[in-house]
Image: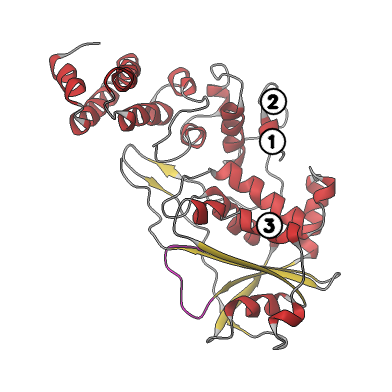
Amino acid sequence: MSAPGLDAALAAGDLDELLRWVDRLCEARDWDALVHLGQRSRAAFAASGRQLWPIVSQVEYRLALEAPPAWAASVLVEGTGRFALGPLPEVAASTHTWAELAPHVVAGPAAGLTAHERVVRGEDLSAAEGVGLGVLEVPGHLSPWEPAYAVATYRADQAEFPAPPPPGLTALEPSRRAPVADIAVDDLEGCAALRALVERWVVESDGVVEVVAVRGPAEDAVASLAGGAGAVRGLEVAADAALAAMAWAGASGGAHGRRRGAAVGRFGAWWALAAVAGLLDEWPVPPERLAEAAAELRWLLWAPPSTPTGWSLHLAVEDPDDGLAWAIAATDPGPHLGRAI
């Protein structure tokens, strides 16, 4: 594909004009020409060092989002979508079924993640062959005890990452006011699994996270993080609401980090649940076993005295049988809308 205006934009490295070309080709549904534009943009960098990676990523993103399955599947490989608004497996799964994509995908981690993204959106792939679900050790179908996970909405120039509906919180009082040092316990597995949910908030964005394990009820774990400064609010919730909150956090990159996707968020929530239930030695845990464990635990969503802005995860979980509880407080200031390229 060659056109005077396009050739000039490539020669000048004019990102604004090249983005307009991407829009024109998508509107015309000229997918072959769009692929060629991506190839020429990549070649321009190799030949002259022009920084056209945003165009390459935008081409790959629009193919995953809008193109017919064969073209969408062509970008579901490692190393694509580096600067896209979201991971391409999630982008493609938001607008294509697995049955549409499966005949065209190249087997590998990206294809497996795409299949898991379809599972999160309600598609049952437990009986499908050659899906590559082993990339994440969670089932290829949603269990009855799982929530309706929050999923991203992608558009040509922006993305939305809705959080689960906020619960109505009321005043929360600790059962006792013992010093944290007197009730804190070492539980590396539980704390690490909860912290891993928001790892990208900290590593790639401006987030902060605290996690604690204590001997006592969930309220005491919360109090040890809240520091007693003002009224803490909370609400005991069912396991599915807690799972939804953990999965949402695990899917995200926070305000500025690279999003991991709803499928990875679901895996992170299952892993955290197994960790606090003491079941990691049995991983991958059968869904029925994990459902029993989730129901036996006590879950709290809570909020600190000062209402956090941006991205936040405030959760506590208690194991009444063992007399242990964990709490996490994670925040990352910033908007919930994907930024335009």
Label 3 and label 1: CA atoms lie apart by 26 Å
Residue appearing at x 61%, y 75% in the figure: 225
Q: Residue at x 46, y 71 (%)?
A: 308
Disc number at residue 92?
none
The residue at which mark 2 appears reads as 128
Disc 2 residue type (three-letter): Ala
Measured from the top left, where is residue 27 in percent x and y? 26, 26
Q: Spatial distance from mark 1 to mark 2, Cα to Cα?
A: 9 Å
- Check disc 3 and report the residue beneath it: 192
Q: Position of residue 138 (x, y in %)?
A: 71, 40
Label 2: state its secondary structure: loop
Question: Residue 197 at what x, y percent from top left?
Answer: 60, 54
Q: Is 138 placed left or right of 148 in the picture? A: right
* Residue that carries the numbered disc 1 in the rendered image: 140
Looking at marks 3 and 2 on the same chain, the residue that comes earlier in the sequence is marked by: 2
Which quadrant is the N terminus positioned in? Answer: top left
Residue 192 appears left or right of 232: right
Range of residues picked out in magenta: 304-315
Q: Earlier in the sequence, mark 3 or mark 1?
A: 1
Per the image, label 1 sits on a secondary structure element best described as: loop
Observer-side mark, 3 or 1, equals 3
Does the segment drawn in magenta span residue 99? no
220 is higher (above) or lower (below) than 47 = below
Residue depicted at 56% across the width and 64% down the height: 209
